Amino acid sequence: MENKIEETLLTPQVVIQSKTDSAVRMNYRFYHKTQVGGKWLCVVEKYTKKEMLSY
C-alpha cells in the first residue's frame, strides 16, 4: 500500500484544493485492480506556513 500512496502523491490523476483550509490538498488516483474492484485512493496533504513559504 505504501507504494500506492507514494505513486498517488507523485502522479495524482486529480488534485482538489480544500474549500475550508487553503493548506490542504487532496490527491486522487484510480486503481482498477483492488481486492474489491476499482477504487479511488485519496491521499490528503497539509502544508504548514513554514513549508508553504519555502516554495
Image (cartoon, rainbow, N blue to C red):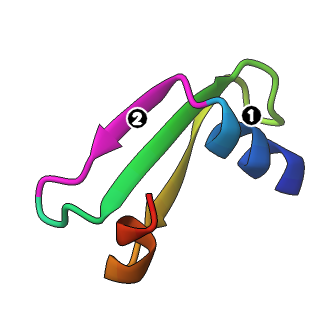
Q: How many marks?
A: 2
Residue 1 seen from this side = no
Residue at 85% from the left image edge and 56% from the top image edge: 2
Residue type at tag 1: Val
> Relative to the observer, which residue lies in front, 46 or 3?
46
Find the residue positioned furthest to the front. Answer: 54
Q: Mark 1 or mark 2, which is nearer the start of the sequence?
A: 2
Q: Residues within 10 Å of mark 2 (few under 14, many from 20)?
A: some
Name the secondary structure under disc 1. Answer: loop
Residue on which disc 2 sits? 15
Q: Could you say where residue 41 lies in the image, as x and y percent from the top left?
A: 60, 41
Residue 26's disc is none
Q: What segment carries the magenta color?
A: 12-19
Secondary element at tag 2: strand
| Residue 10 in the image, given as x and y percentages of width and height | 68, 38
Task: Tell me: residue 28, above or below residue 17.
Answer: above
Query: Which amino acid type is marked by label 2?
Result: Val
Would residue 13 be counted in the magenta stretch?
A: yes
- Residue 45 is situated, as x and y percent measured from the top left of the image, at 48, 62
The location of residue 21, given as percent across then percent down, is 18, 66
Is 30 left, or right, of 4 in this rendering? left
Q: Residue furthest top?
A: 32
Residue bearing mark 1: 36
Residue at position x 39%, y 81% in the image: 50
Q: Residue at the location (83% across, 36% down)?
A: 35
